[in-house]
Amino acid sequence: MTTLSRRGLLGGMAAATALGPLATHRSAHAAAPVTGKQAPGFYRYKVGSIEVTVVTDGMRDAPMGSLIKNASAEQVNAALDSAFLPKDKFPFVFNPCAVNTGSKLVMIDTGLGPATFAQSKGTAGQTHGNLAAAGIDRNAVDAVIISHFHGDHINGLLNADNTPAFPNAEVMVPAPEWAFWMDDARMNSAPEGLKPNFANARRVFGPLASKITKYEDKKELVPGITSMFTFGHTPGHSSHVIASGSESVVIQADVSNHPALFVRNPGWHAAFDMDAAVAEATRRKLYDQVSADKSRLQGFHFPFPSAGYIEKDGSGYRYVQGTWSPTL
Ligand SMILES: [Zn+2]
């Protein structure tokens, strides 16, 4: 077994220098310009015969402020630090996915859309571009399944000119989510802070009215993809289970946000969970289940490629990112 030591490293470097002309020749090529930008973000894995492509929408930091209601700044910073993340910032990552069942090409959620792509100078709203990089034609998408009506999940349904971004797709939405956000009386009596969310749902779904179908709990939406209502984050929030043969994965949407915060600390309440107590109960129930089943789970707000495993760990849970595979 080799022990990597400073002395060993320096010894190796001395040996490389001793190569003389070869080393000089190689250093001449080190002046190539740096790329300066990230590679397109998509990652594939199989669930039985179904092909899942995680297509990242990118990432944005937000000031932590009081985004976590029942933990101190010290506790939150300690959790960030333990994951080697910068303090005082909320790391919002966004990962929709495309699912090819063999008979249907389906999107689950759509990212922040082209307006955010422009505003953020490309750090978020990347889904449409990354779909193209992944070789997935938006015109070929048969259905878009929406988990809930927050902008990071629905805004990518439209192009910058408000035309449908998936022009041939049926748009499937959770019936209770539609009932909540499209209720005018509820919008009119909502707190001011929530009103833009009602308005945005009308903006996005208006041009898609003829394409929308509403779904209930435990329904097979397309062969191999079944709804699983997981309320709390929003009143009609839904996760989805992809299953084929003996394999399955839970596409959890926003049952939790970043795992370093909310998988480790499932009792922490995020300001964006509309009913935080219900969200916590949902989270614990789902994570107890996937821990016991050892089944794969994908989180929309988990670090890309956002698919891995969760196991019980003390009073919380531990997230283990799945290992990258060179083949499908
Ligand atoms: Zn979200």
Image (cartoon, rainbow, N blue to C red):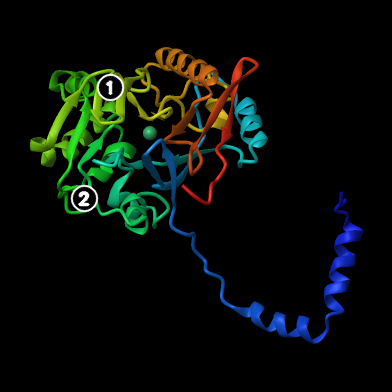
Q: Position of residue 108 (x, y in %)?
A: 31, 37
Residue 320 spot, x, y in % from top left: 59, 33
Residue type at the position of mark 1: Pro
Mark 2 or 1, which is nearer the eye? Answer: 2
Name the amino acid, label 2: Ala
Q: Tell me which residue sits at (88%, 57%) in the image.
A: 6
The residue indicated by pointer 2 is 140
The residue positioned 39% from the left and 49% from the top of the image is 124
Q: Position of residue 79 (x, y in %)?
A: 63, 30
- The image position of residue 289, as x and y in percent, is 48, 16
Instruction: Report the side of 181 relative to 225 (left or right).
Output: left
- Ligand 1 is in which quadrant of the figure? top left
Q: What residue is disc 1 on? A: 191
SS for dot 1: loop
Q: Is residue 199 left or right of residue 240?
A: left
Determine whether 304 is above or below 228 in the image. Answer: below
Separation (CA) of disc 2 from disc 1:
40 Å
Q: Earlier in the sequence, mark 2 or mark 1?
A: 2
Do the residues bearing badges 2 and 1 touch, measured as CB atoms within 8 Å?
A: no
